[in-house]
Image (cartoon, helix red, strand yellow):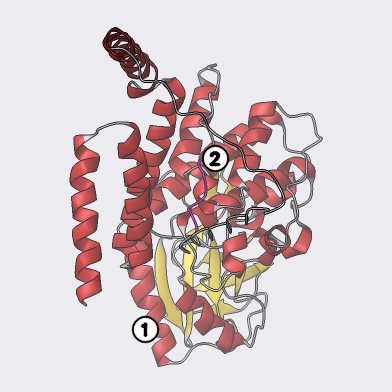
Amino acid sequence: MQLKENTLFDARYRLMRLLGRGGFSEVWLAEDNKTGLTIALKVYAPGTGLDEDGTQLFSHEFALVFNLNHSNLLRPSHYDICDRMPYLIMPFCERGSAAKLMGSISEEKAWRFLHDVAAGLAFLHAQEPPVIHQDIKPDNVLIDAAGRYLITDFGISAKARSTLRKSVGNQSSGGGTIAYMAPERFGKDNTPIKASDVWALGATLFEMMTGDTPFGEHGGLIQKSGAEIPDIRENYPPCLREIAERCLAIGPWDRPTAETIVAWTEQHARGERIIFDRKAKPPPEKLKPEKPKPEPKPKPDKHKPQPTFDTPKRKSAAGRVLWIVGGAVAGLLLFFFVGGKFLTPDAEELERFENLKQLVYTNYEQAKTDNDTDFYTLALGYCNDALAIKKDNDLQDLKAEIERAIGQSDIQ
């Protein structure tokens, strides 16, 4: 079935005009003959349709996300299949997508855009298991009548995208739009993670402010090859530019979470100054450091006169007592100095402790989600580093749990 104007789709929806077309779908403005309402109709695999396995996969995946309800998600009101083509009925947003604001968004709207999209992502990422959008970009953010920004096109997994790509014969990337894909998506393990959505949000915000994506059509692939994040020269406040830059960090663990971004935007809305945490260090390399080779001892020169050493004179008993007392006093002074300066962590060390603690929990949760020993190992390393700074009972308990998990994985 080919979609065109005035076609009656699924014996109910009269197609009025095409609103947009992507790699795997078309969105039509349509009239519901039963209610008389004007709606947005999104049809997947238009014209070709899916086989039975594909339609079952879509039905299963949409069942997982269909009831997700958040003020910054464009929630579909109906899902069905017509001629092997899955479709969604959604509210029609007359104000269109955020794409029309690229390069001209005001500072006020930029803050609102950042808050709304981050809030929607934070909600998706908080699901169990987390919902990774995989394709945040201006076209997938719509504006409702109240001026809110709504994320659309969420809940489609990499497997479903691959099914669509095979069905419609599209050879483009099945995991999102390349210009908005993070550097890690171009590595050996290109599994999308929450931080990948944050990078895409940073690229989208960058484009909204400058009119172009930070790395052109090649996205994080260029950044992975060594390109630096371009400066935002437009007249926006430094804190807003700083957030965009942090979202675009090359290391996933250096990026803020969507929840953190929401907190920053709310601080700004209250008129408070945003205080950024020190950027976290990237995960350490897993390779063991090589042991330094001992330097060869120089051979004595037979022709060079060797130095002679006088035998030291033996100290008197009184002299030995003075040395012992002096050494004890120096030791006490050193103890109190070290205790005051190093045994009690200063503000900088406490900040590093909190960063490490956050990395422990992040890697631990990722390890549980992916059942990946490497993340457990990273979490254990960060845990040891944090406990070296400050004792923490919760971290100590978590360390024991991580060690048990690594031990069980080794047994298996």
Question: Which label was assigned to residue 385?
Answer: none
**Region rendered in magenta:** 280-286
Location of residue 374 in the rendering, given as x and y in whole percent from the top left corner: 38, 64
Amino acid type at mark 1: Gln
The residue positioned farthest toward the bottom in the image shown: 51
In the rendered view, tell whether residue 23 sits above or below residue 37. Answer: below
281 in the magenta segment: yes
* The quadrant where residue 101 appears: top right
Q: Secondary structure at mark 1?
A: helix
In the rendered view, tell whether residue 309 sits above or below residue 409. Answer: above
Q: Secondary structure at mark 2?
A: loop
Number of numbered discs on residues: 2
* The quadrant where residue 404 appears: bottom left
Residue drawn at the location 30% of the way across and 68% of the way down: 371
Q: Quadrant of the N terminus?
A: bottom right
Amino acid type at mark 2: Arg
Q: Which residue is mark 1?
A: 56
Q: Label 1: few (<14), some or many (≥20) within 10 Å?
A: few
218 in the magenta segment: no
Q: Image check: 293 left or right of 219?
A: left
- In contact (CB < 8 Å): disc 2 and disc 1: no
Residue drawn at the location 35% of the way across and 59% of the way down: 377
Dot placed on the residue nearer the N-terminal end, 2 or 1: 1
Location of residue 376 in the rendering, given as x and y in whole percent from the top left corner: 32, 59
Q: Is residue 267 visible?
A: yes
Q: CA distance from mark 2 to mark 1?
A: 33 Å
Residue drawn at the location 53% of the way across and 55% of the way down: 197
Of 257 and 366, the residue lying toward us:
366
Q: Is residue 126 visible?
A: no
Question: Which label was assigned to residue 148?
Answer: 2
Location of residue 143 in the rendering, given as x and y in whole percent from the top left corner: 59, 46
